[in-house]
Amino acid sequence: MPRKFLVALPFLMIVPANAQDDKVANSCERIGKASQACRTRFPQRFGDTKTGQDYIECILLQERAPNHTCLGAGTRGEFAACVTNSSIRVMETCDLTKC
């Protein structure tokens, strides 16, 4: 019986790791698409009056507030998921009125 368990153990460890990798890949893809869309809208709205540095500062300020709510997350994984989700929301919302 223990031998069967030892053979199955690597498989049981790989399946959750692959699921986690898929979540990370999906999150990275969503952030990338949202970020690209928001960066495209920035010069359309402001033209040459604002620079890329202005864009970075604007988005970072919007991300800081929701990220502070993540400080109470129980585990490191929950904290990372909270920060990732709040970053995705900020980028997908792309509120340029605060710039």
Image (tube, grey):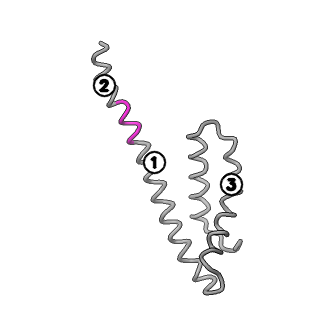
Q: Which residues are magenta?
A: 12-18
Query: Counting other residues with Cα less than 10 Å from the Cα at mark 3, is it few (<14), some (14-19), or many (20 or more)?
Result: some
| Marks 3 and 2 in Cβ contact (< 8 Å) | no
Query: Counting other residues with Cα less than 10 Å from the Cα at mark 2, is it few (<14), some (14-19), or many (20 or more)?
Result: few
- Residue type, mark 2 in image: Ala
| Marks 1 and 3 in Cβ contact (< 8 Å) | no
Q: Position of residue 79 (x, y in %)?
A: 61, 44
Mark 1–mark 3 distance (CA, rounded to whole Å): 21 Å
Disc 1 designates what residue?
23
Residue 72 in the image: above or below residue 65: above
Q: Main secondary structure of the magenta part?
A: helix
Residue at image point 49% right, 60% down: 30
- Residue type, mark 3 in image: Pro
Disc 2 designates what residue?
8
Answer with mark 3 or mark 2, whichever residue precedes in sequence. Answer: 2
- Give the side of residue 20 with respect to residue 71, left or right: left
Answer with mark 2 or mark 1, whichever residue precedes in sequence. Answer: 2
- Give the side of residue 91 with respect to residue 9, left or right: right
The quadrant holding residue 92 is: bottom right
- Residue type, mark 1 in image: Lys
Q: Position of residue 86 (x, y in %)?
A: 61, 54
